[in-house]
Image (cartoon, rainbow, N blue to C red):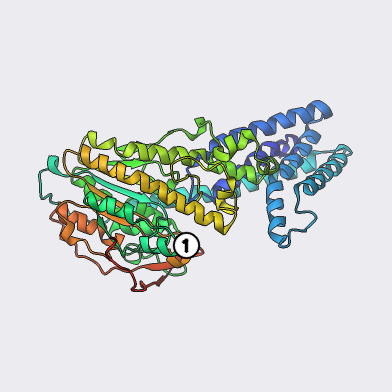
């Protein structure tokens, strides 16, 4: 108890708590390592601030109290500002402006500092803040620990599933590499034409000329990535894969565990395939334990650019003022640095895909590319947008509907310029004709969120493909073609659900106006 009353440990606790709290609330999305740099910087800055206060006051207790007050105001500023902005529907609220709010925060600091300086005994408030800080740290850390334990347990449970052995129809050296390329949020051709006035027939005909089958009426089985990928990788509908996936359950872990340890990967591994996976930026959707894990940087701590997690942290602090004025050090050249990690990861994946055929075979290659999903950073020719209106809205969305339409169109066009070249090089360099699947995991908007791009290059199995094929049957057909698998083809269904109720599935039928012929 003497330790709690005497030493202002709360300085460190309040310094790192906001980082841990942000990590805790986003633990489903991010790699734990992305928080390390922020924790070290926040902790070091807190100690430096405390040292400066101590040099002025020559009293550790008072210096600690003022330091913690500064930290609370610093880390809460962005939250308060955004809350006021959301309440300010008319744009006239006096306090919902930086020049006003920062003055209010400064006055609060001056008043509290004046009161602290007049305190004669700091032991009681020091002990109280130490206790509060400890409780906050514990409240932030426990969900992270429970998440990691629960995820690992569910991933391990997936490995106990009974699966039938695969019998190759050809000797192992003659089996093809299998490329599974996901273009996140890539919508189907007819929806692009109708909703975005974008004609992609030229691109689709390029792919057809190379031998790709265009699933012209293709749909995803689910409306969000976690469910869609879990179903595709396990070749079944989610309620049949895990009894925890049922209406009313809002815990997404059962779906993400099905991605981490899935039936397809185990089947191919047992058949002699090596697994190659690319960094996706999302912890739940990448396989770091693959035989070969490819990433532009294997250590986010050493990455010179500001990571998306760090950007979220900055936006929640007093640095929100600096971020909103977009200085060179934070945004980079005309706004491009803000999303440099996404840009780097996307270009790395696209550049590496056609290099893999020269490596050892057979391989299963999983590349989930977070384009054309927001943020809309790429122009059609591959240059990066310098107009931040393409990605400066809430959650990196464009600032207006006009920018949304233009930005999404350009990212589609960017991919349409890239994919024929990449697919052509993969086919040309492969000693054994490969299997290449290029799919959208879901669409882009609620009304067309289940209409997706689906292109399949499957030498020897073309006759099994059909216009309304959904991802749940994709690898059933692939395994039936390459192995004596005899997987029955399931009925193709598509289900919509909201993020707030991810497993409350509602079946959505196609309107019936899809035309299979794309020419």
> Does residue 108 appear to the left or right of 436 in the view shown?
right
Foreground pick, 112 / 335? 335
254 sits to left or right of 233: right
Q: Nearer the viewer, residue 348 or 104?
A: 348
Image vertical order of residue 106 relative to residue 197, above or below: above
In percent of width and height, residue 449 lies at 43, 63
Question: Which residue carries the number 1 mark?
Answer: 445
Does any portion of residue 177 appear in the rendered image? yes
**Residue 505 image offset from top left, x and y in percent:** 41, 69
Secondary structure found at label 1? loop
Q: Nearer the viewer, residue 436 or 308?
A: 436
Quadrant of the image occupied by residue 186: bottom left
Q: Position of residue 231 (x, y in %)?
A: 33, 59
Q: Quadrant of residue 128?
A: top right
At horizontal 85% and vertical 38% (from top left) the residue drawn is 121
Q: Position of residue 276 (x, y in %)?
A: 30, 40
Residue 518 is drawn in which quadrant? bottom left
Task: For label 1, count other residues whose C-alpha is less than 10 Å away and answer few (under 14), some (14-19) or many (20+).
Answer: few
Image quadrant holding the C terminus, namely bottom left
Side (left or right) of 8 relative to 207: right
Q: Nearer the viewer, residue 381 or 181?
A: 381
Residue drawn at point x = 42 percent, y = 41 percent: 346
Residue 380 sits above or below residue 474 on the image: above
């Amino acid at each position: 108890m003497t330790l709690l009353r005497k030493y202002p440990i709360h300085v460190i606790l309040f310094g790192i708590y906001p980082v841990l709290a942000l990590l805790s609330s986003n633990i489903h999305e991010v790699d734990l390592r992305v928080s390390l740099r922020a924790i070290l910087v926040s902790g070091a800055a807190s100690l430096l601030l405390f040292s400066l206060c101590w040099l002025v006051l020559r009293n550790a207790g008072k210096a600690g109290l003022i330091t913690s007050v500064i930290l609370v105001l610093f880390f809460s500023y962005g939250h308060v500002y955004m809350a006021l902005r959301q309440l300010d529907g008319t744009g006239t609220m006096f306090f919902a402006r930086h020049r006003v709010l920062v003055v209010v925060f400064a006055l609060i600091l001056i008043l509290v500092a004046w009161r602290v300086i007049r305190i004669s005994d700091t032991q009681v408030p020091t002990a109280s803040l130490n206790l509060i800080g400890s409780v906050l740290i514990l409240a932030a850390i426990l969900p992270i620990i429970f998440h990691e334990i629960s995820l690992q347990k569910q991933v391990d449970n997936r490995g106990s599933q009974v699966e039938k052995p695969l019998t190759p129809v050809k000797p192992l050296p003659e089996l093809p590499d299998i490329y599974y390329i996901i273009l996140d949020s890539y919508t189907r051709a007819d929806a692009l034409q109708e909703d975005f006035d974008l004609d992609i027939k030229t691109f689709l005909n390029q792919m057809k000329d190379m031998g790709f089958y265009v699933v012209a009426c293709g749909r995803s089985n689910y409306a969000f990535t976690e469910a869609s990928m879990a179903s595709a990788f396990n070749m079944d509908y989610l309620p049949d894969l895990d009894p925890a996936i049922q209406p009313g359950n809002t815990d997404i872990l059962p779906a993400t565990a099905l991605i981490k340890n899935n039936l397809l990967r185990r089947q191919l591994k047992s058949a002699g395939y090596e697994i190659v996976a690319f960094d996706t930026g999302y912890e739940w959707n990448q396989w770091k334990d693959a035989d070969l894990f490819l990433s532009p940087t294997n250590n986010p701590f050493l990455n010179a650019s500001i990571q998306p997690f760090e950007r979220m942290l900055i936006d929640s602090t007093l640095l929100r003022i600096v971020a909103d004025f977009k200085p060179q050090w934070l945004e980079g050249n005309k706004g491009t640095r803000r999303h440099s990690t996404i840009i780097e990861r996307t270009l790395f994946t696209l550049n590496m895909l056609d290099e893999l055929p020269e490596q050892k075979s057979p391989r299963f290659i999983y590349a989930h590319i977070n384009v054309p999903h927001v943020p809309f950073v790429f122009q059609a020719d591959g240059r990066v947008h310098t107009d931040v209106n393409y990605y400066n809205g809430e959650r990196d969305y464009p600032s207006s509907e006009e920018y949304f339409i233009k930005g999404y169109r350009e990212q589609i066009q960017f991919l349409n310029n890239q994919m024929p070249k990449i697919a052509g090089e993969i086919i040309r360099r492969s000693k054994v004709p490969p299997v290449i699947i290029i799919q959208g995991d879901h669409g882009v908007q609620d009304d067309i969120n289940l209409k997706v791009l689906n292109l399949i290059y499957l030498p020897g199995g073309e006759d099994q493909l059909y216009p309304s094929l959904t991802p749940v049957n994709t690898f059933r057909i692939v395994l039936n073609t390459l192995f004596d698998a005899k997987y029955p083809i399931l009925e193709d269904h598509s289900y919509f659900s909201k993020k707030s109720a991810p497993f409350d599935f509602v079946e959505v039928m196609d309107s019936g106006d899809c035309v299979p012929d794309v020419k």
